[in-house]
Amino acid sequence: MAAISRLKPKPLLSLRSFCPSISSSSQHSSDPEAEPDETLVSTSISILKEHRSRSRWSQLKAVLPPGGIPPSATVRILSGLRNRPHLALSFFHFSRCRDLLSFCAAAHVAARSRLRPAALSLLRSAVRLHDSPAIFETLAKTYRSFDSAPFVFDLLILAYLDAKKIDRAVHIVRLLRSRGIHPLLPTSNSLIRSASKLNGSDAGLELYRELFGSDNLRVSPNVQIFNTLLLAMYQDGQSDRVDEIRVEMERFRVDPNVFTYSVLLAGVCDDGTRIREARELWEEMAGRGIKPDIMAFNTMINGYCETGEMEKAEELYRDMVFDEIEPTCTTYEHLIRGHCKVGDLESAMMVYTDMKTKGFSAGVEVVDKVLDEMCKRGRVDEGLVVLREEMKREGFSPSRRSYEALIGGFCDRGEMEKAAKLQAEMAGKGFAADEKVYVAFVEGYRKMGDEEKVLRLCDEMNQLGMEKER
């Protein structure tokens, strides 16, 4: 794997079955592991436990040394408060200690109480501030003294993935696996997803094989992991390789779910020539008793729209509504594009109107398709009304293609003034007139017999390096 280096697992010298406690090292100094002042530790714990929330922090400030709480004392206080995790974490933030040992201690306190978001947040901060392999070593060394939870190492892996440091994450997985510890399945899934996103589906597949390639597995992959691999292949344009994943699913006796079929359907529907395979997948899904969701319906509807099979697309749409699955904006957009593709403008406009009544807004590409069809049929004024209505909504900005379609339509009808106003508006939006616009005006003025303007526009085209209209 190119981007995930083949790091040889180092012996877990500091782990030693999640090694003994950290209590008996060192001295009170700037060294995080220096022995703390026992009086300071016991007094601080007593104040935090016995005083009310409003007074405890002012009382604590009164007993602290001028330099603040030493890191070693912070760790001991956190240990003493570990059965009151919210109080311990409040103390950690109060202490402002940002050394690695304090971060790991606080993460253990959160993890042992199943405060996963808090533990993950702490480890993310540790990764950001202490970019070092020592994070894992420190977390392992302090594990037993805080009676922590094993998933704390999964959270460290996730923290590295969030920081896009996948080599570090993989290295930790290898260290853990060398001790017979396998990451949780959601963690493995995140690893594979991150590898696929950063380095492609081949990297994700190679990591999957490293994690699950052995025949003596304590943990088997689940459907979510296979779905991640299938999605990565689809996104990389390698849907022709999905059989590799389906063979693996059979090997582990993992049944596909509706998401599995949605990805498989997308792979064959996007091709535009494999609608028969899509139908077979749809029937296979039904045969397994899996009900399609909105994603599966949208994918299959799009497949029929791409091949111009609009009757089947509309039939699927009706099935979806009958099954009480609410159409999305994407559903309507697929149908509008499909009707436009086969030249059925009336049906496209019916769907468009239905879409608007349901509160959805068409994307720019869909508006372009509608305007193209309207202008081809001489319904330019209606097309302009559609554009103006869309421009009233926030966030919509007409495309060059919309303006070109309308300008071409008005020029074809000889309504040059309307075309000129649109061209000025188009320029105001930052779209300079291109050859298509010039040709539309040349043809329009030529039909009107205005040769002077035709010649002038042809000269401009020549000066701009465009091919003159013959």
Image: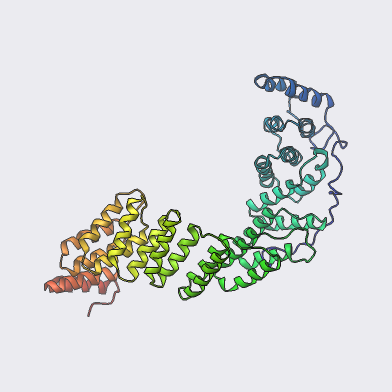
Q: Is residue 428 left or right of residue 94?
A: left
Is residue 400 in view from this perspective? no
Name the residue: 59% across, 60% down: 257
Residue found farthest to the left = 449
- Front residue of 260/207: it is 260
- Give the image quarter of residue 172: bottom right
- Give the image quarter of residue 80: top right
Is residue 124 in view from this perspective? yes
- Front residue of 434/331: it is 331
Rendered image coloring scheme: rainbow
Name the residue: 73% across, 30% down: 84
Question: Compared to 273, does 215 lie above or below?
Answer: above
- Front residue of 325/151: it is 325
Q: Is residue 69 left or right of residue 406?
A: right
- Give the image quarter of residue 375: bottom left
Residue 378 position, x and y percent, is 21, 67
Residue 464 position, x and y percent, is 29, 71
Residue found farthest to the bottom = 470
Residue 32 position, x and y percent, is 79, 37
Question: Compared to 262, does 68 lie above or below?
Answer: above
Question: Compared to 55, does 425 lie above or below?
Answer: below
Give the number of callouts.
Answer: 0
Name the residue: 66% across, 39% down: 118
